Image: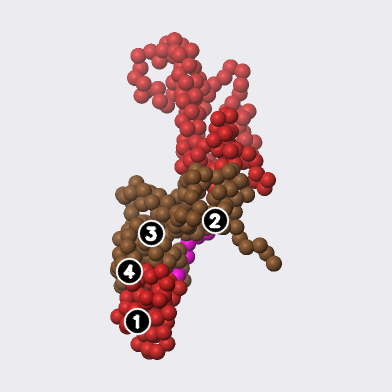
Chain colours: A red, B brown
């Protein structure tokens, strides 16, 4: 049997200084970390040897320094996430799933939202937000294309053969249709606070004017 | 007089039968320790919590097949967490722990070094700079408090190999930390 892993202390060889130094180098100064079968002999040597105690103190100083690195505690949110994945909290997608996982509400377990197996984690939340954002962008793009197609003949008459770049500052581009409405005055939606009446209703914000008073205010409509 | 705590084996068996109370008791008993293990191996709290969550998902899944009297639950949890951390680190090789945790100034003044927070950063950085196996051995034995036999089982090495990893790791840590805390290590 390996001398370092005896089933009990009966076959323990006498402790030498060399072996004690090996124990201290590997496990540090805490005797409860030493191999069980060698612990008593090592402690006996420590009682009788000043050199052994000096070596032990040296190892203890490194232990103390290592103990400075404290790990953060598990957050309450993590405990909730872990319990949400527990067998009795798993979603009952159908009778067969319920049978497999023994779904049933526990007496002290709140019924948490039904979720999949690898859930509530950070990656899941990021993926969900990304998917929602992508869906929103897609819908907005589809709406813009539909409006463009509806106004296309009128726009082409206005723009004629002029290069597209020349239209950038005239607000005649077809997408301006998104800002215009025959029945809705967009200036009504501007905030009353921080906005003052101007030539075009309320096209200027006080903050903008304070920041760059020398820059001419742009007209909203040509 | 309070009742003795229910054994892990009993709780796991109850989890296998869908007992929510047993799930909560096991999570409250072991979650903090598993987060600490993952944090010390990964150096990032959010990643550590993700790994800890996955560890418990696997426990819930495995509970119905748990063999009482076999491996200790703590050994099993440490082994699963360790493997998940290795996988996690393998996936993010481009940003190793030592780069993420290295202090800005490798030679701060003694006054700064003895400051608790600064010293903690240095220790974490030194730990993160160790070769993976040495770091794992030190985390399991020094920080997680596993005995040598249990730590050797978790690492799947012999006790002699574990001692070698521990000794080399502690020597490397002492060398690195002597530069920032010589007084604390008795080398000032």
Asked if labels 3 and 4 touch by Cβ distance under 8 angstroms, the answer is no
Tag of residue A14: 1
Tag of residue B153: 3
Label 4: few (<14), some (14–19) or many (≥20) C-alpha neighbours in 10 Å: few
Give the residue pinned by disc 4: A2
Q: Is residue A98 above or below residue B169?
A: above
Measured as percent of width and height from the top left, residue A57 is found at 40, 82
Toward the right, the furthest residue is B1
Please name whichever residue, A74 or B20, is drawn nearer the observer in this view of the structure: B20
Sequence-wise, the earlier of marks 4 and 1 is: 4
* Quarter of the figure that contains the N terminus of chain A: bottom left
Please name whichever residue, A179 or A1, is drawn nearer the observer in this view of the structure: A1
Q: Is residue A87 left or right of residue A149?
A: right
The secondary structure that dominates the magenta segment is: loop
Residue at 39% across / 80% down in the picture? A42
Tell me the SS state at disc 2: helix
| Subunit that carries the residue with mark 1 | A
Tag of residue B8: 2
């Amino acid at each position: 049997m390996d001398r370092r892993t005896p089933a009990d202390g009966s076959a323990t060889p006498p402790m030498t200084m060399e072996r004690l130094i090996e124990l201290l180098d590997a496990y540090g100064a805490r005797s409860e970390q030493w191999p069980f079968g060698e612990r008593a002999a090592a402690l006996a040597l420590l009682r009788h040897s000043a050199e052994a105690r000096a070596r032990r103190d040296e190892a203890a100083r490194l232990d103390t320094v290592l103990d400075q690195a404290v790990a953060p505690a598990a957050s309450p949110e993590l405990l909730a996430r872990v319990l949400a994945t527990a067998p009795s909290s798993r979603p009952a997608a159908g009778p067969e799933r319920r049978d497999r996982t023994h779904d049933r509400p526990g007496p002290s377990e709140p019924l948490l939202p039904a979720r999949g197996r690898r859930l509530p984690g950070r990656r899941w939340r990021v993926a969900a937000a990304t998917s929602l954002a992508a869906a929103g962008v897609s819908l907005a793009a589809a709406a813009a294309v539909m409006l463009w197609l509806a106004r296309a003949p009128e726009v082409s008459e206005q723009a004629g053969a002029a290069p597209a770049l020349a239209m950038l500052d005239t607000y005649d581009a077809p997408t301006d249709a998104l800002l215009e409405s025959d029945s809705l005055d967009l200036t009504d939606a501007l905030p009353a606070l921080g906005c003052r009446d101007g030539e075009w209703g309320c096209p200027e914000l006080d903050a903008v004017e304070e920041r760059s008073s020398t820059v001419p205010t742009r007209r909203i409509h040509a | 007089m309070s009742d003795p705590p229910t054994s892990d084996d009993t709780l796991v068996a109850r989890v296998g039968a869908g007992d929510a109370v047993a799930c909560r008791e096991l999570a409250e008993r072991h979650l903090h320790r598993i987060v600490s293990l993952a944090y010390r191996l990964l150096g990032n709290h959010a990643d550590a919590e993700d790994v800890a969550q996955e560890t418990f998902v696997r426990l819930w899944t495995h509970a119905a097949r748990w063999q009482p009297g076999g491996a200790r639950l703590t050994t099993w949890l440490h082994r699963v967490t360790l493997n998940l951390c290795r996988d996690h680190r393998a996936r993010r090789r481009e940003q190793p722990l030592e780069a993420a945790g290295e202090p800005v100034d490798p030679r701060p003044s003694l006054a700064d070094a003895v400051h608790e927070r600064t010293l903690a950063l240095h220790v974490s950085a030194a730990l993160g700079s160790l070769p993976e196996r040495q770091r794992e051995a030190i985390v399991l034995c020094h920080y997680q408090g596993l005995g040598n036999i249990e730590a050797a089982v978790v690492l799947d090495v012999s006790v002699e190999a574990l001692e070698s990893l521990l000794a080399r790791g502690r020597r490397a840590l002492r060398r690195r930390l002597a530069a920032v805390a010589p007084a604390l290590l008795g080398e000032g």
